[in-house]
Image (cartoon, rainbow, N blue to C red):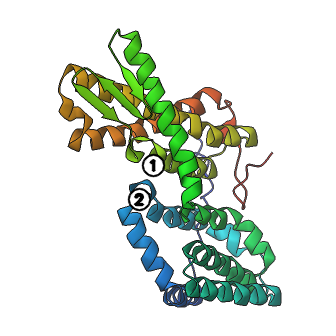
Amino acid sequence: MSTEPAPTLPKPPQREPASRGDIAALAAAGALFTWLFWPILSVRWHYYDEAPRYSHCPMLPVVSAMWVWDRWDDLRAIPRRVSTGGVVVAVLCVAAFVYGRLVSMNFLQHLAMLGTLAAALWAVCGSRVVRACAFPLAYLLLTIPLPKPWDEAITQPMQTFATRAGEVVFDAFGWVVVRQGNVLQLPGLKLLMEDACSGVHSLYALVCLGIAWVAFTSRPTWLRIVLVVSTIPIAIAANALRVIVTGILAYEVDPKYAAGTSHSITGMLVFVTGLLMLLFVDWCLKPDDADDVAPDADGAAGA
């Protein structure tokens, strides 16, 4: 009885390590960028720490960096060339940043900072590299807090929806409930839907997570769009469920469940619930061959 040697499987391609020149150039560029834009970076860091609805923003640059690292070999293979157009745009963006500093416009400063980053990449590497890095660059726009009028335009409808959802459910239970604006009055209990209860933080964080999810997974374009759009109703529904559960616990068990640590814990559960719902939607709609679709250099799934 003869035996044949097992076939030798090809070794997976090894990631080409970054050269010392690349590392030194990236380190120098990062140090220069941090020094130049430290005023707005410092302001934003403190703002993210003080505003719960934007506390997820410091993680977004990490997501962009992970995307670049995941496709580092493909990006390095793109021909690079210096572009004078990128230099001109970078100078204009720096000028816009300085103007924003003079007139105290944080939104303009932040936008100019990200514009400078994209223009500098264009100047050093060329437009093809910028197009290939469209996702990580555009993703950083999510770190810019919305102007206050826009933020309020999103917060108020979500507060109203959560309050009305609670009113409908409590009324279905046969409880005596009176709604006045964003306040639910129950016998011996008042539930106030403050900004923190609107679910805006979960909405913003879930939208960012949904975009990151479709960028790192192989999905058809239609499913990518559906998943990102679905984060909005999912966050709204999850927050309404939070209000209902909090009201039931506060009314039937202990009013302390509507405030303090318990209230903070339910807030975190909203995000977890929304994440599970997003994964469930993805599992239900994902085609059987979706994992066989390989993402190309710019993150879009190939046909």
Q: Which mark is residue 55?
A: 2
Q: Which mark is residue 231?
A: none
Report the side of 10 relative to 275 (left or right): right
Number of marks in the rendered image: 2
Task: Give residue 142's quadrant in the image.
Answer: bottom right
User: In this figure, which residue is indicated by the disc labeled 1?
Assistant: 201
Residue 207 visible to an observer of this rendering: no
Crowd rating for badge 2 (residues with CA inside 10 Å; few <14, some 14–19, many 20+)? some
Q: Secondary structure at mark 2?
A: loop
Is there a contact, CB below 8 Å, between mark 1 and mark 2?
yes
Crowd rating for badge 1 (residues with CA inside 10 Å; few <14, some 14–19, many 20+)? many
Residue at (60, 79) in percent of width and height: 113
Residue at (67, 84) in percent of width and height: 96
Residue furthest to the top in view is 174
* Residue type pointed to by label 2: Ser
Question: Is 280 in front, or is 37?
Answer: 37
Q: Is residue 165 above or below residue 88?
A: above
| Residue 271 position within the rendered picture, expressed as x and y whole percent measured from the top left | 42, 41
Residue at (66, 64) in percent of width and height: 138
Work out which quarter of the rendered image holds the N terminus and state it: top right
| Residue 250 position within the rendered picture, expressed as x and y whole percent measured from the top left | 24, 27
Report the side of 27 relative to 294 (left or right): left
| Residue 182 position within the rendered picture, expressed as x and y whole percent measured from the top left | 42, 35
Earlier along the polypeptide chain: callout 1 or callout 2? 2
Q: CA distance from mark 1 to mark 2?
A: 8 Å
